[in-house]
Image: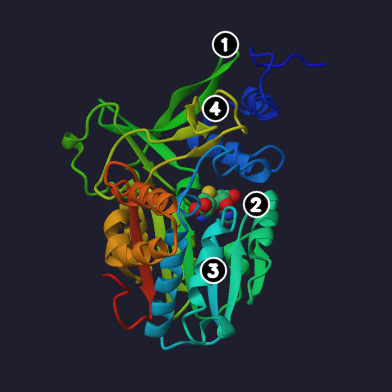
């Protein structure tokens, strides 16, 4: 047997596979390392694990409160009206997790006359295990559903798309600024039997930073962008009428810093600790999304802080309505969960909402 190039005898199967790849081919970009951690066909996190919820690795807004998905359902109903109530209409979700958001949205959409009768639901999901969870969560819903590995497989036609914590999963390229006023791509190399960061050859100014003045950027600054964004936004723009609701954690001003994070069992883990075993994501560069939307001639609204968006959509009224039917304890619990979504010190400010539309006559609520 060939000796493993890794020092750690308990390394994960993906660590061994990556080490063999590095030993043979030299350093990998951070992008390719992250891509392997998430999408390696055998061991990638979104192929094998993707454990969402209290007992898993991370928790998301729809798992915190049903009100989140319900308000999104009502939002979709309103946008459908603004589109002129096309039928059929495709309600598409990118990365639907355990199916909770869609189940809550469809329940709320029952009050929108005509919507469910004319809608087909399309769930775009890479994880087979999560596809199963989605089937279980949505089995009873009175509407036609199909699953797809890729957005390109969703049939043409008017569409409303939802992407909650989807873009953060897409691998980022990282570029490091050095004192010689040049950018280098950040890489991962194998040294002494362990993974570590390295810098690659000089590259031209990364796209999206073309107008930033070099003398304002500090030595060692890290800039992140996602190469997959342009293709996804172009796929949006191929549809009309169309609206996409993008919710994620991230930043809007040009911003520097390494935001790639590995999370396992609700705690931060080292990026190189156990590849394939933890969720690896990075904050979303909303400016990049908006630039891609402008290039594709889409209309853009936001980003707006999630807390503000939920309050302006009528979160309080819905909570009051649900509280009326609940015990005191249940009502208190619901209020504390909703506060987590809205409070700027928790998810209310870091999470942002960006809406992109094509061929829709009015701004989507509450913009
Ligand atoms: N929206 C859900 C889940 C967020 S986690 C929620 O809010 O709870 C990210 C989701 O995107 C998971 O379902 C993951 O399996 C899926 N996913 C990640 N990368 C994907 C890709 N490239 N294509 C489709 N689905 C993807």
Residue under pointer 3:
92
- Earlier in the chain: of badge 1 and badge 4, it is 4
The answer for how far apart the CA atoms under marks 1 and 3 are is 47 Å
Seen at 29% across and 31% down, the residue is: 221
- Earlier in the chain: of badge 1 and badge 3, it is 3
* Res. 160 visible in picture: yes
Q: Nearer the viewer, mark 1 or mark 3?
A: 3
Q: For the C terminus, which image quadrant?
A: bottom left
The answer for how far apart the CA atoms under marks 2 and 1 are is 37 Å
Give the class, few, some or many, for how many residues have Cα within 10 Å of label 2's Cα (few <14, many ≥20): many
Give the class, few, some or many, for how many residues have Cα within 10 Å of label 4's Cα (few <14, many ≥20): many
**The quarter of the displayed image where residue 219 is located:** top left
- Residue 108 in the image, given as x and y percentages of width and height: 48, 72
- Earlier in the chain: of badge 2 and badge 3, it is 3
The answer for how far apart the CA atoms under marks 2 and 3 are is 16 Å
Give the class, few, some or many, for how many residues have Cα within 10 Å of label 1's Cα (few <14, many ≥20): few
The answer for how far apart the CA atoms under marks 1 and 4 are is 14 Å
Mark carried by residue 192: 1
Name the one closer to the observer, 205 or 141: 141
Q: Is mark 2 within 8 Å of ligand 1?
A: yes
Q: For the N terminus, which image quadrant?
A: top right
- Residue 226 in the image, given as x and y percentages of width and height: 44, 48
* Res. 295 visible in picture: no
Seen at 50% across and 80% down, the residue is: 158
Q: Nearer the viewer, mark 2 or mark 1?
A: 2
For mark 1, give the secondary structure. Answer: loop
- Residue 17 in the image, given as x and y percentages of width and height: 69, 29
Residue under pointer 2:
130
- Earlier in the chain: of badge 4 and badge 2, it is 4
Name the one closer to the observer, 346 or 268: 346
Residue under pointer 4:
27
How is the protein colored in the picture?
rainbow
């Amino acid at each position: 047997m060939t000796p493993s190039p890794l020092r750690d005898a308990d390394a994960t199967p993906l660590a061994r596979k990556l080490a063999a790849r590095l030993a043979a081919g030299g350093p990998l970009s951070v992008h390719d390392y992250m891509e392997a951690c998430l999408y390696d066909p055998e061991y990638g996190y979104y192929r094998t694990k993707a454990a969402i919820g209290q007992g898993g690795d991370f928790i998301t807004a729809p798992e915190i409160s049903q009100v989140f998905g319900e308000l999104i359902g009502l939002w979709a109903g309103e946008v459908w009206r603004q589109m002129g109530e096309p039928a059929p209409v495709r309600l598409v979700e990118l990365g639907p997790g355990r199916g909770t958001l869609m189940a809550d949205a469809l329940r709320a959409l029952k009050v929108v006359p005509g919507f469910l009768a004319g809608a087909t639901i399309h769930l775009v999901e890479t994880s087979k295990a999560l596809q199963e969870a989605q089937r279980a969560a949505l089995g009873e819903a009175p509407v036609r559903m199909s699953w797809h590995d890729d957005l390109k497989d969703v049939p043409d036609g008017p569409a409303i798309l939802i992407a909650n914590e989807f873009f953060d999963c897409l691998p980022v390229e990282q570029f490091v600024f050095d004192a010689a006023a040049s950018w280098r791509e950040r890489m991962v190399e194998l040294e002494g039997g362990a993974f570590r960061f390295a810098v690659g050859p000089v590259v031209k100014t990364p796209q999206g930073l073309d107008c930033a003045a070099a003398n304002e950027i500090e030595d060692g600054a890290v800039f992140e962008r996602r190469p997959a964004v342009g293709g996804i936004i172009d796929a949006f723009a191929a549809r009309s009428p169309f609206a996409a609701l993008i919710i994620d954690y991230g930043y809007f001003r040009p911003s520097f810093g390494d935001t790639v994070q590995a999370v396992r069992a609700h705690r931060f883990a080292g990026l190189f600790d156990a590849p394939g075993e933890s969720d690896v994501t990075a904050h979303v560069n909303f400016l990049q999304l908006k630039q891609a939307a402008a290039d594709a001639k889409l209309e853009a609204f936001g980003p707006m802080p999630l807390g503000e968006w939920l309050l302006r959509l009528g979160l309080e009224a819905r909570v009051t309505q649900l509280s009326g039917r609940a015990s005191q304890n249940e009502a208190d619990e619901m209020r504390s969960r909703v506060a987590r979504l809205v409070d700027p010190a928790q998810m209310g400010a870091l999470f942002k909402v960006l809406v992109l539309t094509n061929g829709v006559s009015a701004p989507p609520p509450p913009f």
